[in-house]
Image: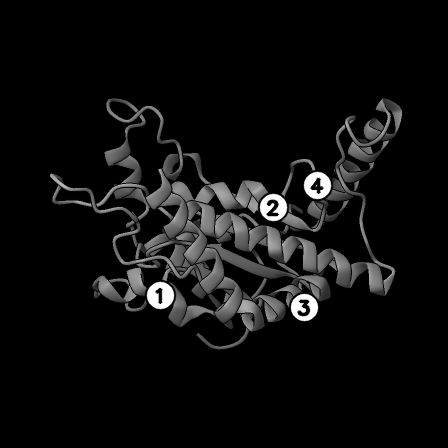
Amino acid sequence: MTTWFSAARAIFDRIEATQSAAIERASQICADAIAADGLVHLFGTGHSRIPVEEMFPRYGSYPGFNPIVELSMTYHTQVVGANGQRQAMFIERVPGLAEIILQNFQFGPRDAMMVFSASGLPAVPVEMARGARRRGLPVIAITSVAQSKAGTVRPEVGARLLDEADVVIDLCTPASDALCALEGLDTPVGPSSTFAAVAVANTIKVRTAQLLIDRGAMTPVITSTTVVDEQRSRELFDAAYREHARRLARVLSPDAGRQPLTGGV
């Protein structure tokens, strides 16, 4: 237990020491989008779905972040059989699927995209970033540079996630993801990318909130009854969901997917 905690603390320290500038740039992009009445769209497959849900909706979060996940690539608890892990891992490697997903939305000039992928290699997250950039959205990639560079780019994908982003935030996790080598076991245990991604997500969330406050553009924060009374908690919850629905209505308009592509790859 001590070994894993020590290794985890070292990763937190590396993120803070080396990624603060990138996190600040990402937060500025998020604040620009939200303050301009846009959305920061969030995407991840596999266990990279977890930081997507961490951003919104949950206590301590606020509208302006729009989670986009596909159950076919994120429903892992079934493990085998129908909806099993093999299918999910196969689907996230299918070229062209990201473009089909993107066609369901009408992205605006005020929007941004944040893509989480520890390896940054499967086709869907890579092409999600690529497709967002082609639509003129600034793209933030949150990935493990070591893990990504240790892997091989598939010819049909043609790039890593970190190649398709305007801002790259390194999770600072090892190529193995797992942190602990135990005597008597030839493979490491104790993964790290999830807690690192959640830490980065919350750091961006907090910094973006401060930037929005400074601009007078902060949206309602979903807050527990352990902090405010029940009526205030309900009011904040309803206000946050109304605000999210208002912003999302534009993205899900009948013309979704019909907008022309702009910008380069």
Cα distance between the residues tagged 2 and 1: 22 Å
Count residues near mark 2 (Cα–Cα under 10 Å), then give few for <14, some for 14-19, many for 20+.
Answer: many
Residue type pointed to by label 2: Met
Q: Earlier in the sequence, mark 2 or mark 3?
A: 3
Q: Is residue 154 left or right of residue 242?
A: left
Q: Earlier in the sequence, mark 3 or mark 4?
A: 3
Residue at numbered disc 1: 145
Cα distance between the residues tagged 2 and 3: 16 Å
Q: Which mark is residue 34?
A: none
Count residues near mark 4 (Cα–Cα under 10 Å), then give few for <14, some for 14-19, many for 20+.
Answer: some
Cα distance between the residues tagged 3 and 4: 19 Å
Q: Position of residue 87 (x, y in %)?
A: 26, 35
Which residue does the image show at 88% across and 24% down from the upper left?
A: 231
Residue at numbered disc 3: 28
Q: Is residue 232 left or right of residue 181?
A: right
Residue type pointed to by label 3: Gln
Q: Position of residue 16 (x, y in %)?
A: 53, 64
Q: Earlier in the sequence, mark 1 or mark 3?
A: 3
Say which of 15 and 250 sits in front.
15
Looking at the rendered image, the quarter that the N terminus falls into is top left
Q: Quadrant of residue 38?
A: bottom right
Residue type pointed to by label 4: Gly
Residue 173 appears in view: yes
Task: For the residues labelled 3 and 4, say whether their Cβ atoms are less than 8 Å apart.
Answer: no
Cα distance between the residues tagged 4 and 2: 9 Å
Q: Nearer the viewer, mark 4 or mark 2?
A: 4
Quick one: SS at disc 3? helix
Asked if 45 appears above or below 258 in the picture, the reply is: above
Quick one: SS at disc 1? helix
Residue at numbered disc 2: 55
